[in-house]
C-alpha cells in the first residue's frame, strides 16, 4: 500500500502552491479530486507554453494523479453539490482568499459538522489574520515582501527574484506536511482540525538564517551573488570552460583545496589562515583562487577537489541536469504522455522522498476540464438524471 492510500482529498486550489501540496499527497497515494471552474479550469492551464487544448507544462506537472471535476462554486447548487460530496475523514484543501470560502458556505465552520474527522487546509498569500489578510499575492510578491529579494542578486545591481517558485513550492510542502501531521493526530483522537498556511509565513521561514544574523549583528545583509557572508570560499569560480561552486565549510577543507590546486604556499599567509580572515579578505581570496581555476577545465577542477574530499559542483544548465547520471540514478523524473499534447512526452519530477527504496509517483494527468465529473459524482451517489440536469444548468461540466 502507498502511505496515504484510502485518503480522499477534495482539492479547491489552483496556480502552484496548493496544487503542489495536493500533487505530493497524490504521489503518496491519496485519492485527489480537483474541483475546477467549468470552461476555464485552473488558471495554470493557460500559462505559456501551450502544449494542447487547455494544457500547459505547469498544469500537467502539478496536477498528476488527480481527477478533474468541474463545478461552479459561485452558484448555490454548486456549493451544495460540493457539501454533498464530502465523506467522513476527507481532507479539503483550498487557496481562496481569506473569507471567500466562508462567503460560499464552504468555510471550516460550515463543513466540520457535516462529516467526522474533516481536515481542512486553507492556503493564503499573507495569512488569515492581520491587516493584509484579504489581499491576493503570488510567489514574487512574497519574495519581495519577506526580504528574499533583498539578499538575492549581485551587489550594486537591483534585487533579484529567485528563479524558481521557492515560496510556492515551500508552501505546498509545509501544507502537505501539516495535513499528514493532522491525519496522524486524527488517527489517535478521531478528530480533524483546521490547518492554515501562507506564502508569507513560508517566505519568512526561508529567511530564518539571515534574520538570525541580522538580529545578532544589527547589520543588514547585502546581495552577494553566489556567495554567503559566513564562509569563504563558498561561491562560484570561473574555469576555462564554465563555472564551479566550491564550498569550504572549515579551515581543514580550505587546506585540502589549496593542495588540490597547488597553492599550498598560501597556507602560510595570515590573510588566508582562518575562515574569519578569509571573510575579511574576500575579494583577495576569490581573485587568487580564480586566477588558478580560470586556467583549468571544469572536469579537471572537479576531479582534483573531489579526490581530496572538497565539496565542489559544476554549475549545470537544465540540459545537463536532466541528462546527469546521478540524477538519473535517483529515478526522480519520468516522461509522461499528456493526452492531446503537441509536445509528446513531458519530463515530470516526482516527490523527493522514497519509502523502502521506492519512489511513489502518481502518473495520471487529466487532459480536460471536467474529465472525471460524471464518474466522481456518480460514485458520490448522484443518479444519472441529476448529473444531466446539473450539466444542462451549467452548474457542472462534463468533458
Image: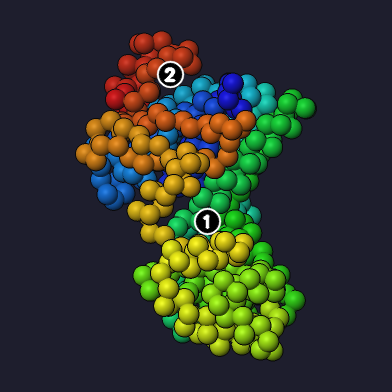
- Mark yes or no: residue 355 visible: yes
Residue 214, compared with residue 352, is above or below; it is: below
Residue drawn at (48%, 47%), measured in percent from left and top? 326
Quadrant location of the C terminus in the rendered image: top left
| Tag 2 secondary structure | helix
Residue drawn at (66%, 83%), measured in percent from left and top? 267
Structural crowding at the residue carrying mark 2, measured as other residues with C-alpha within 10 Å and reported as few (<14), some (14–19) or many (≥20): some
Residue drawn at (55%, 77%), measured in percent from left and top? 262
83 left or right, relative to 280? left
Residue 367: horizontal and vertical position, in percent? 31, 31
Residue 220, compared with residue 365, is above or below; it is: below
Determine which quarter of the picture holds residue 204: bottom right
Counting residues from the start of the chain, the first of labels 2 and 1 encountered is 1
Q: Which residue is mark 2?
A: 377
Structural crowding at the residue carrying mark 1, measured as other residues with C-alpha within 10 Å and reported as few (<14), some (14–19) or many (≥20): many
2 left or right, relative to 193? left
Q: Which mark is residue 167?
A: 1
239 left or right, relative to 353? left
Residue 174: horizontal and vertical position, in percent? 61, 47
Amino acid at each position: 500500500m502507498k502511505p496515504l492510500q484510502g485518503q480522499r482529498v477534495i482539492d479547491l486550489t489552483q496556480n502552484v502552491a496548493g496544487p503542489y501540496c495536493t500533487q505530493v499527497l497524490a504521489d503518496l497515494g491519496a485519492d485527489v479530486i480537483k474541483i475546477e471552474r467549468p470552461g476555464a479550469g485552473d488558471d495554470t492551464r493557460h500559462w505559456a507554453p501551450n502544449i494542447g487544448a487547455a494544457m500547459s507544462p505547469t498544469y500537467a506537472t502539478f496536477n498528476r494523479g488527480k481527477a478533474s471535476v468541474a463545478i461552479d462554486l459561485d452558484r448555490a447548487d454548486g456549493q451544495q453539490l460540493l457539501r454533498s460530496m464530502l465523506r467522513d475523514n476527507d481532507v479539503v484543501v483550498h487557496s481562496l482568499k481569506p473569507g471567500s470560502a466562508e462567503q460560499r458556505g464552504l468555510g471550516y465552520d460550515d463543513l466540520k459538522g457535516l462529516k467526522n474527522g474533516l481536515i481542512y487546509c486553507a492556503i493564503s498569500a499573507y495569512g488569515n489574520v492581520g491587516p493584509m489578510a484579504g489581499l491576493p499575492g503570488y510567489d514574487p510578491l512574497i519574495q519581495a515582501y519577506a526580504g528574499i529579494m533583498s539578499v538575492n542578486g549581485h551587489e550594486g545591481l537591483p534585487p533579484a527574484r529567485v528563479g524558481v517558485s521557492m515560496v510556492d513550492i515551500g508552501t505546498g510542502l509545509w501544507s502537505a506536511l501539516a495535513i499528514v501531521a493532522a491525519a496522524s493526530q486524527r488517527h489517535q483522537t478521531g478528530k480533524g482540525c483546521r490547518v492554515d498556511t501562507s506564502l508569507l509565513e513560508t517566505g519568512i521561514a526561508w529567511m530564518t538564517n539571515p534574520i538570525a544574523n541580522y538580529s545578532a549583528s544589527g547589520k543588514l545583509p547585502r546581495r552577494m551573488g553566489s556567495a554567503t557572508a559566513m564562509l569563504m570560499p563558498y561561491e562560484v569560480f570561473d574555469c576555462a570552460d564554465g563555472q564551479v561552486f566550491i564550498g569550504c565549510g572549515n579551515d581543514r577543507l580550505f587546506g585540502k583545496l589549496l593542495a588540490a590546486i597547488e597553492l599550498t604556499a598560501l597556507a602560510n599567509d595570515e590573510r588566508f589562515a582562518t575562515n574569519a580572515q578569509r571573510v575579511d579578505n574576500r575579494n583577495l581570496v576569490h581573485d587568487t583562487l580564480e586566477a588558478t581555476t580560470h586556467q583549468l577545465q571544469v572536469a579537471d577542477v572537479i576531479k582534483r577537489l573531489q579526490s581530496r574530499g572538497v565539496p565542489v559542483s559544476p554549475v549545470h544548465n537544465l540540459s545537463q541536469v536532466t541528462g546527469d547520471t546521478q540524477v538519473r540514478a535517483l529515478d526522480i523524473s519520468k516522461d509522461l504522455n499528456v493526452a492531446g499534447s503537441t509536445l509528446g512526452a513531458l519530463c515530470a519530477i516526482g516527490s523527493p522522498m522514497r519509502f523502502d527504496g521506492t519512489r511513489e509517483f502518481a502518473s495520471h494527468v487529466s487532459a480536460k476540464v471536467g474529465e472525471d465529473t460524471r464518474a466522481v459524482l456518480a460514485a458520490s451517489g448522484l443518479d444519472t438524471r441529476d448529473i444531466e440536469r446539473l450539466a444542462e444548468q451549467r452548474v457542472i461540466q462534463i468533458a
